[in-house]
Image (cartoon, rainbow, N blue to C red):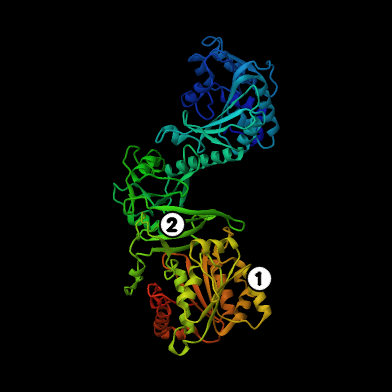
């Protein structure tokens, strides 16, 4: 029969503990560890000569072990008469000075300031059930009263949020200093295998003569870890949750494998407490043929490559792990707010903790290889940071890609895994190198990071593959065919980003006019300042809501577009579709889009949907409005571009003729460039090869 309580309320019941100790008899019951585990931190805060009140002692051997190493002033109290009688009998001869009293911890008979320390192992956790929070507060008030100035309340706890929040807030209000130690089991020890999944914490609260005007809130790892200072209770509690999550994950990883789990954790800087590394664990599938030595490896993602498909998507990470061919691969990304010296320094930093994540059964002393691309950490330089009222904090950064090129990115820090906009940078010294013809996508000569040459955005290079497909889709309109070389092309684009797509259209598509609708004025300013965006009479920007603009244009009537493009992200991450927002693909809006198109018009939608059922629903709605729909999936991404026509013609019949249309558009883009050293780096024919009829 289990002796554990059936409800939280029983933990604070005298009747429950009376029955508990009668059933258990003489066997000691150790909550959260014994003297050997706790002695390091206990000796640090409780002096041998201190008068110590042990609250809720139970039949733990901890007081006896403290007595045996020299602590002679221990007063043990418990609410259970049975356990007090038993403990007095057990220690009468061997430890005559060890005192046990039957006392309610919420109403003690001791004088004010009569103890230098109060030791609590599990009692706060037992009393602080949600319904009985008042009882725990009464106990803490009593502890506060009996401690002298400089005295310490030392509490061994699992630090469940409701419990630790109650205690920390209580002592902060009193103006005491609060410190937490997170104790972790030794890797591979028997205690680790049999311990709680949650780590044990030791809460140390110190009483001052005058209340502290500003709270002192600190967290340490282990007995003697350096304290990390926190400015608010909520931040301290957040740090506690992170360590609890890490401990649960660590235990899970040491006992099982799961190739589909994609477990992720964050390691913080020891001094600042800020995120430093994000680690994702990828296990190989069951039955995979892995060489015996290839048990475990760490892969360091180069700075600036974190958002690449291979590292940021579950499919990419599985592919990376398969190519590495290790039983378990830990993929490590470095944070943009941190500084890193070199690969050797990163390895030295990670080496003490990576064995926590090793697969089950791996020896603790086995060497773990570190893998990387190119052998260095990559390069990243933040050039601007700001705040948008609509999208939150953002940064503009330059990075060096794995291809050696320099790129500029706009990243909103609420979703650092997503690059909002990206452009390639070139120097004036390399711009002329793009003149050389190449059937494949042209590449600029790599610009050294230390180059002093001025950098500018290469407006002829589209970094986003879906932007390339959206441009290639203009071939369906016959843009570029000789007989329509003077026919104007009007485009409405919802979503500006860095302005790379609309600027490409303006610079290279003959006779085009582009209206961009952008909700966030900060994005427009960033595009102008950092991405070389220059509107003019052929490229205009309307600030406002895209849906409202579409509704207004349709109600005005008479203004039609040859192309309407949606390239706008969804800020609601809880939905399985990150582009566009759900409202953009509702039938009434799709119908208005259709009404705004010319008879030859084309609706082009960038769709990013991880939910198969939601994608199916979106396609059904789009097909219900647009009779002809072609799709083009983006390799190694979840993006797909839909090319939709509201005419009755069967777009499938156009596919055989697209080869010539692609050549015409390619020629038109090249001939329409406005400067001899500017060239569109795009292969229209290649982009249209994999169109699929929906």
List x then y, in percent, for residue 31: 54, 29
- Residue 85, quarter of picture: top right
Q: Which mark is residue 398?
A: 2
Give percent across and percent down for residue 645. Answer: 54, 81
Q: Which mark is residue 68?
A: none
Q: Is residue 11 visible?
A: no
* Alpha-carbon span between mark 1 and mark 2: 34 Å
Q: Quadrant of the N terminus?
A: top right
Q: At 54% from the left edge and 67% from the top edge, which residue is drawn? A: 496
Direction from residue 525 to residue 269 in the image, left or right:
left
Q: Which residue is mark 1?
A: 548
Looking at the picture, tell me which residue is in the foreground, 10 or 548.
548
Q: Is residue 253 visible?
A: yes
Q: Secondary structure at mark 1?
A: helix
Q: SS at mark 2?
A: strand
Rendering coords of residue 3 (x, y %)? 58, 31
């Amino acid at each position: 029969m289990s002796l554990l309580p059936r409800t939280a309320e029983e933990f604070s019941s005298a009747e429950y503990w009376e029955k508990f100790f009668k059933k258990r008899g003489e066997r000691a019951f150790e909550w959260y560890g014994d003297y050997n585990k706790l002695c390091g931190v206990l000796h640090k805060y409780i002096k041998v000569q201190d008068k110590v009140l042990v609250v809720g002692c139970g039949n733990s051997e901890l007081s006896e072990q403290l007595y045996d190493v020299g602590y002679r002033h221990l007063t043990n109290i418990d609410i259970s008469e049975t356990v007090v009688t038993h403990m007095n009998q057990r220690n009468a001869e061997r430890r005559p000075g060890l005192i046990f009293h039957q006392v309610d911890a919420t109403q003690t008979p001791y004088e004010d300031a009569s103890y230098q320390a109060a030791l609590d192992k599990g009692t706060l956790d037992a009393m602080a059930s949600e319904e009985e929070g008042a009882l725990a507060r009464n106990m803490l008030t009593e502890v506060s009263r009996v401690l002298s100035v400089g005295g310490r309340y030392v509490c061994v706890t699992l630090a469940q949020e409701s419990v630790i929040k109650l205690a920390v807030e209580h002592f902060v209000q009193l103006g005491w200093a609060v410190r937490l130690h997170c104790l972790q089991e030794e890797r591979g020890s028997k205690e680790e295998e049999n311990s709680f999944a949650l780590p044990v914490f030791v809460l140390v609260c110190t009483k001052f003569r005058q209340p502290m005007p500003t709270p002192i809130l600190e967290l340490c790892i282990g007995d003697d870890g350096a304290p990390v200072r926190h400015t608010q209770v909520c931040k301290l509690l957040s740090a506690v949750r992170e360590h609890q999550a890490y401990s649960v994950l660590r235990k899970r990883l040491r006992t099982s494998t799961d190739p589909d789990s994609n477990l992720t954790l964050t390691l913080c800087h020891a001094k600042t407490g800020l995120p430093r590394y994000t680690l994702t664990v990828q296990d190989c599938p069951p039955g995979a043929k892995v060489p015996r030595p290839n048990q475990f490896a760490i892969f360091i993602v180069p700075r600036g490559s974190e958002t690449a498909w291979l590292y940021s998507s579950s499919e990419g990470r599985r592919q990376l792990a398969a190519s590495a061919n290790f039983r378990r691969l830990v993929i490590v990304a470095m944070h943009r707010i941190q500084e890193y010296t070199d690969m050797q320094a990163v390895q030295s930093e990670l080496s003490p903790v990576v064995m926590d994540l090793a697969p089950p059964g791996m020896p603790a002393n086995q060497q773990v290889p570190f893998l990387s691309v190119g052998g260095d950490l990559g390069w990243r330089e933040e050039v601007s940071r700001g705040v948008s009222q609509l999208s939150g904090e953002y940064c503009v950064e330059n990075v060096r890609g794995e291809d050696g090129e320099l790129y500029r990115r706009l990243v909103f820090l609420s979703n650092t895994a997503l690059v909002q906009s990206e452009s390639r940078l070139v120097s004036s010294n390399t711009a002329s190198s793009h003149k050389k013809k190449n059937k494949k996508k042209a590449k600029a000569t790599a610009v050294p990071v230390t180059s002093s040459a001025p950098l500018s955005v290469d407006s002829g290079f589209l970094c986003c593959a879906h932007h390339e497909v959206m441009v290639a889709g203009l071939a369906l309109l016959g843009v570029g065919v000789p007989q329509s070389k003077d026919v104007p092309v009007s485009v409405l684009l919802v979503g500006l980003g860095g302005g790379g797509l609309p600027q490409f259209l303006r610079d290279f598509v003959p006779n085009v006019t582009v209206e961009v609708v952008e909700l966030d004025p900060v994005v427009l300013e960033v595009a102008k300042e950092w991405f070389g965006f220059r509107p003019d009479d052929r490229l205009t920007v309307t600030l406002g809501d895209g849906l409202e603009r579409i509704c207004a244009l349709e109600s005005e009537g008479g203004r039609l577009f040859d192309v309407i493009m949606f390239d706008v992200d969804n800020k609601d991450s809880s939905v399985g579709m990150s582009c566009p927002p759900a409202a953009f693909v509702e039938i009434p809006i799709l119908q208005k889009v259709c009404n705004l198109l010319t008879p030859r018009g084309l609706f082009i939608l960038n769709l990013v949907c991880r939910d198969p059922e939601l994608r199916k629903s979106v396609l059904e709605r789009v097909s219900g409005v647009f009779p002809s729909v072609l799709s083009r999936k983006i390799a190694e991404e979840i993006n797909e571009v839909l090319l939709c026509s509201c005419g009755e013609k069967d777009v499938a019949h156009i596919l055989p003729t697209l080869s010539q249309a692609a050549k015409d558009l390619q020629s038109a883009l090249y001939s329409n460039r406005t400067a001899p050293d500017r060239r569109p780096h795009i292969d229209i024919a290649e982009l249209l090869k994999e169109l699929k009829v929906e």
